[in-house]
Image (cartoon, rainbow, N blue to C red):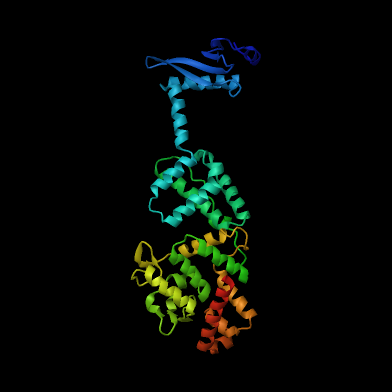
């Protein structure tokens, strides 16, 4: 019977030789000096050899345990050698990396921009430490820690996207028959998304850096234009993205948003700068005869999703790589208000442009539209942006 002292004393010879242990376990010593535990057995009338492992990687005690496991398999009519091969194949087919490829194959309908974003996120943030792990090895705390690390580097949107990719891969695996829990379901996106301060106002340089990066991006042109129009008009995302052509009067340079589309449920007039008119005319090409200024790419009878604009802006912000402090697209409105107040524009005019409702007594009685003043203000604001971006 073997022990560690005897095994270490075994020297290689010209030809390989074996030394027996007990219960059928033996050690093969190769001319190279490698010592391998093996077990010979019969199953269904044939002889097979089960290679347990190399000494030094597998201890003698562990080899004896594996021998017992092999004998249990034999008792159930299962070949230990075939079982080992099947297990290796299963493991190679059920790593996160393997299922990532299946996930891409199952989602051929991704828009080009979405696909590029997902691939980039996977390769940068998921692949290095997770692609070779079995789905069963990845736990909720592993994903949460990764998301927290990404969040701490100032990329909260990427953190949420990483969680989403994990979630979608596991959902696919489960649908395809894998009997495993989804570790991403326990992670709530709001819990990992570090909200950016609601007091963020951008500087002129922030806007410049953002617009330059936006122009360099490969986003769908209509998405880029929706983001620019948000900045120029001071509107909310849904108010822009759900716009219809019958709301816009190019002759009077006015966009009338009906009450049902406004947060305050009051119709709102937007006095259009030359810059916005130019972009709207460009959008007539992309809208392909749709009633919507920003139709969905796959269905011109519906508007583009607000999330498309949001995602496009967030991707652009992330690509600034720290040149600008984190912000969200809604901060465009706060930025316009801050800068215009600093430059001495009338508060009532600014608030009307932002479609803010003043609930004070003064606000209730102040029904003035300030059309001429607001036309000047909106054109001045657009000119400021263009000057910063030069």
Image: 319 above or below 285: above
Q: Could you say where residue 98 lies in the image, as x and y percent from the top left?
A: 46, 40
Residue located at (57% from left, 77% from top): 384
Q: Position of residue 297 (x, y in %)?
A: 38, 63
Marker count (numbered): 0
Q: Position of residue 363 (x, y in %)?
A: 56, 86
Residue 369 visible: no
Quadrant for the N terminus, please. Answer: top right
In-front residue for pair 97/380? 380
The quadrant in which the C terminus is found is: bottom right
Q: Is residue 207 above or below residue 79?
A: below
Which residue is more in the foreground, 330 or 189?
330
Q: Nearer the viewer, residue 150 or 265?
A: 150
Q: Residue at x 59, y 52 (%)?
A: 150
Q: Residue at x 46, y 70 (%)?
A: 238
User: Quick check: 375 left or right of 302?
Assistant: right
Q: Residue placed at 50% from the left, 20% from the top?
A: 51
The vertical placement of 79 against 120, above or below, is above
Compared to residue 220, the image places residue 336 above or below, namely: below
Q: Residue furthest front?
A: 390
Residue 144 in sight from this viewpoint: yes
Q: Residue furthest right?
A: 5
Residue 194, percent from left and from top: 60, 59
In the rendered structure, the answer to whether residue 215 lies left or right of residue 152 reads left
């Amino acid at each position: 019977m073997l022990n560690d002292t005897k095994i270490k004393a075994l020297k290689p010879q010209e030809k390989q030789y074996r030394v027996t242990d007990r219960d059928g376990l033996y050690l093969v010593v190769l001319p190279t000096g490698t010592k391998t535990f093996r077990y010979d057995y019969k199953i269904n009338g044939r002889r097979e050899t089960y290679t347990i492992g190399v000494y030094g990687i597998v201890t003698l005690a562990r080899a004896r345990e594996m021998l017992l496991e092999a004998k249990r398999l034999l008792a159930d009519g299962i070949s230990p050698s075939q079982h080992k091969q099947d297990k290796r194949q299963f493991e190679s087919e059920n790593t996160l990396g393997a299922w990532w490829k299946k996930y891409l194959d199952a989602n051929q309908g991704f828009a080009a921009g979405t696909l590029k974003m997902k691939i980039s996120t996977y390769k940068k943030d998921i692949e290095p430490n997770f692609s070779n792990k079995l789905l069963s090895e990845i736990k909720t705390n592993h994903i949460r820690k990764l998301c927290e690390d990404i969040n701490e580097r100032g990329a909260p949107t990427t953190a949420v996207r990483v969680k989403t990719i994990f979630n979608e891969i596991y959902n696919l695996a489960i649908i395809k028959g894998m009997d495993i829990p989804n570790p991403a379901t326990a992670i709530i996106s709001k819990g990992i998304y570090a909200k950016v301060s609601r007091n963020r106002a951008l500087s002129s340089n922030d806007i410049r850096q953002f617009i330059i990066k936006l122009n360099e991006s490969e986003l769908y042109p209509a998405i880029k234009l929706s983001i620019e129009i948000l900045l120029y008009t001071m509107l909310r995302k849904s108010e822009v993205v759900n716009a219809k052509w019958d709301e816009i009067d190019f002759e009077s340079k006015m966009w009338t948003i009906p009450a049902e589309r406004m947060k305050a449920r009051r119709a709102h007039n937007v006095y259009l700068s030359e810059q916005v008119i130019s972009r709207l005319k460009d959008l007539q090409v992309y809208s392909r005869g749709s009633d919507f200024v920003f139709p969905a790419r796959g269905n011109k009878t519906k508007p583009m999703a607000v999330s498309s604009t949001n995602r496009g802006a967030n991707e652009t912000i992330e690509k600034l790589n720290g040149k600008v402090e984190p912000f969200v697209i809604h901060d465009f409105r706060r930025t316009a208000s801050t800068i215009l107040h600093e430059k001495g524009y009338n508060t009532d005019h600014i608030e009307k442009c932002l479609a803010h409702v003043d609930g004070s007594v003064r606000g209730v009685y102040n029904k003035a539209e300030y059309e001429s003043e607001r036309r000047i203000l909106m054109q001045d604001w657009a000119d400021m942006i263009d000057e910063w971006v030069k």
